[in-house]
Amino acid sequence: MTDLPEYFFRVKENGATVFRVDTENRQRRIEMDPIANINIRNGEIKPQGDRVLTEQDRAEIEAWMAHRREVLAQRDVDDILRAVDHLNLVAQWAQSKATDAQLEEITDTLLLTMHDLRSVLVRKKAERLTSEG
């Protein structure tokens, strides 16, 4: 049981609940004491109840938050690259397998979605080029 980490982070939609893991008790069972709730989006760390977090607690939480932000950013890019793959698969489907009825069902929605995406990408690219030059 000595291989367990000192902290456990139960991931929630906007952050996590932080637990201190304790195995040094009479019953020799794992106890998880909730010490804080954290919000990844705004960086807020709220101690549980009247608890005062130690410097080590805060350092561990901040390190976890930084790592979590990196993981989420990587996932965002991966999701976009998967969307590119799906768009390619949609193009192949539309060209080779789709019936007229299927195309009629999805064409307008898909064209509007792609137009919106194109508008955003063009605007963002123009902003980047303007700020660089």
Image: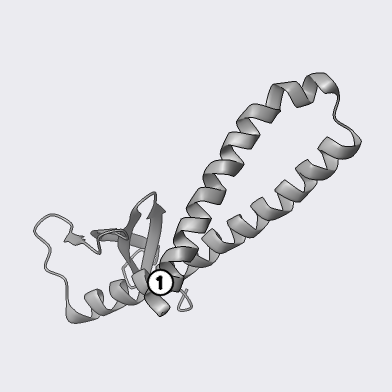
Residue 23 shows in the view: no
**Mark 1 secondary-structure assignment:** helix
In depth, the one of 24 and 77 nearer the eye is 77
Q: Residue at x 79, y 46 (%)?
A: 89
Say whether residue 16 is left or right of residue 92. Answer: left
What residue lies at 76% left-to-right and 41% top-to-bottom?
90
Quarter of the view holding residue 24? bottom left
Query: Depth check: 22 or 51 in front?
Result: 51
Residue pictured at 61% horizontal, 43% vertical: 114
Q: Is residue 60 left or right of residue 28?
A: left
Relative to 95, is 60 on the left or the right? left
Residue 104 percent coordinates (x, y): 74, 22
Q: Is residue 125 above or below residue 105?
A: below
* Disc 1 residue crowd, few under 14, some 14–19, many 20+, Cα 10 Å: few
Q: Is residue 83 visible?
A: yes
Location of residue 12 in the rendering, given as x and y in whole percent from the top left corner? 38, 51
Q: Which residue is mark 1?
A: 130
Q: Quadrant of residue 38?
A: bottom left
Camera-nearest residue between 111 and 47? 111
Q: Residue furthest top?
A: 101
Question: How far across and how far down the image is residue 63, in percent?
Answer: 34, 77
Going by the numbered disc 1, the residue's amino acid type is: Thr
* Visual colour scheme: one colour
| Vertical side of 113 occupied by 47: above or below | below
Residue sitting at the far right: 96
* Image position of 90 (left or right of 83): right
In depth, the one of 30 and 65 nearer the eye is 65
Q: Residue at x 86, y 38 (%)?
A: 95
Q: Quadrant of the C terminus?
A: bottom left
Instruction: Classify residue 36 by image quadrant.
Output: bottom left
